[in-house]
Amino acid sequence: MVKISNFCIFRKHSTIEEFSGQTFDIQTKILPGVTHWQSPNYFAYYPSNSSIAGFLGEMLSAGLNIVGFSWITSPAATELEIVVLDWLAKILNLPNEFLSAGQGGGVIQGTASEAVLVVLLAARDKVLIKVGKNALEKLVVYASDQTHSALQKACQIGGIHPENCRLLSTDASADYALSPAVLGEAISNDVANDLIPFMLCATVGTTSSTAVDPLPALGKIAKSHGMWFHIDAAYAGSACICPEYRHYINGVEEADSFNMNAHKWLLTNFDCSALWIKDRSALIQSLSTNPEFLKNKKLPLMLQASQANLVVDFKDWQIPLGRRFRSLKLWMVLRLYGLENLQGYIRNHIKLAKHFEELVSQDPRFEVVTPRKFSLVCFRLLPHNDEACASKLNHDLLDIVNSTGKVYISHTVLSGKYVLRFAVGAPLTEERHVNAAWDVLQEKASTLLGSM
Ligand code: PLP
């Protein structure tokens, strides 16, 4: 047996009685305060999948506990990440420029927020090299008003003037997608005012309602103004592994960077946000550091890899230095389940969401608010008489339904209307869970309407 005297501080507490005491504490003190994202009755926000494969990868990563910031600190971690992101890029049928063989490549970030931040920094520095550092105040970034707030946070961190983050209006008539005409007009106004458009962030599957921005037209506009074009497909990117949904990212050829969260809807435990970029040098130029303590020149030739630029050092593609071996879980998911099973998994959720949408449509007291594209249904209880009371009515319905503890849903606001969101995507959800959730919604709606 290995002697682990250094661990005696922990061993002091590790009698069987104390261990079962801790287990008891987890059940009595921790679990009552946990929101069960893996429950089959969880339909809030967006899913955050876990799976046996993802869990195994996570466990292996925790056990190895490497800190793979540069290639030399654990070559397998860097190499596997390159390989696995190339696989996923091919599954998504991304353009070849995003593959590691050329000037581009993929990298795992913690979240979509980190992904948009690093590309904003790369885009900012790229344009500042051309126009001069003093022009920072003039840089403008464009997106729709449905874009995730992560973009605004990236602007704050990246020093973009708060007024220069243009969140352009969308409406129900275009299903909340960004209009190329509105974008074109905003750019023309800014150019006329001596401002510098430098980045466009489009979304495929917005957080509120899964709106899909028209990538081909937007991409052309971005290109004609020399802007960086980023696509945020954090949630809906997973659906694009199915050929019948791949068209939602048509136009990705025009993009400089593309991001999707495998940890949302692709059975990969949090965190695993896949970012691909066509010109990795732009990212490296913005984010690389090379302090003495990380240099490896004195090592034998084979190990001088970083200095010789023979290898990838992912520390230069991200904000932190240290990084976990996250590719292990994505690797496990892709290898253990395979593409066909993953496609079946996505299709099943979309089928269940369609089923829920049909249930809502059949009840005249409710309306489906926006056409469903993926596995999110936006709906609401219609008010008896005036629109003014609709928000309160739906707010109350959400509260009563969630307080049953039988189901968990969330809400958003679209065109000023308070709307309920039903996002199918937990790995264990079946039709009976969807039906049971609908029963709760109908029952509580009857109670509410009856008391009015
Ligand atoms: N982008 C979109 C479209 C999202 O739906 C979300 C979260 O739901 C995000 C970005 C932010 O994701 P993260 O938590 O990975 O930063």
Image (spheres, rainbow, N blue to C red):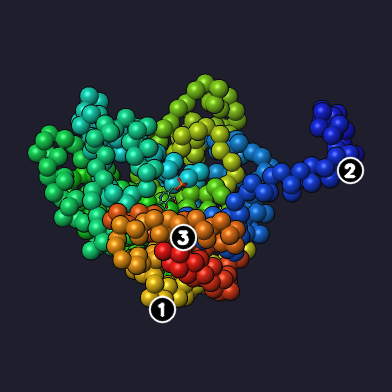
Residue at 36% of width from left, 56% of height from top? 391
- Work out which residue is located at the far front of the displayed protein and give it: 451
* Image quarter in which the N terminus is found: top right
Q: Which residue is mark 1?
A: 362
- Residue type of the residue flagged with mark 3: Leu
Badge 2 local density, few (<14 within 10 Å), some, or many (20+)?
few
The quadrant in which residue 134 appears is: top left
Q: Residue 184: x percent and y percent?
A: 15, 50
Q: Residue 80: x percent and y percent?
A: 56, 49
Q: Residue 335: x percent and y percent?
A: 60, 62
Say above or below: 14 vs 55: above
Q: Are marks 1 and 2 in contact (CB under 8 Å)?
A: no
Mark 1 vs mark 3: which is more N-terminal? 1
- Residue type of the residue flagged with mark 2: Ile
Mark 1 vs mark 2: which is more N-terminal? 2
Left or right of 355 in this view: 419: left
The answer for how far apart the CA atoms under marks 1 and 3 are is: 19 Å
Q: Which residue is mark 3?
A: 397
Left or right of 92 in this view: 131: left
Mark 2 residue element: helix
- Residue type of the residue flagged with mark 1: Gln
Where residue 16 is drawn, which disc sits there? Answer: 2
* Image quarter in which the C terminus is found: bottom left
Residue at 49% of width from left, 31% of height from top? 307
- Work out which residue is located at the far top of the displayed protein and give it: 292
Front-most of residues 200 and 208: 208
Figure disc tally: 3
Q: Is residue 285 visible?
A: no
Mark 3 residue element: helix
Residue at 60% of width from left, 28% of height from top? 299
Q: Nearer the viewer, mark 1 or mark 2?
A: 1
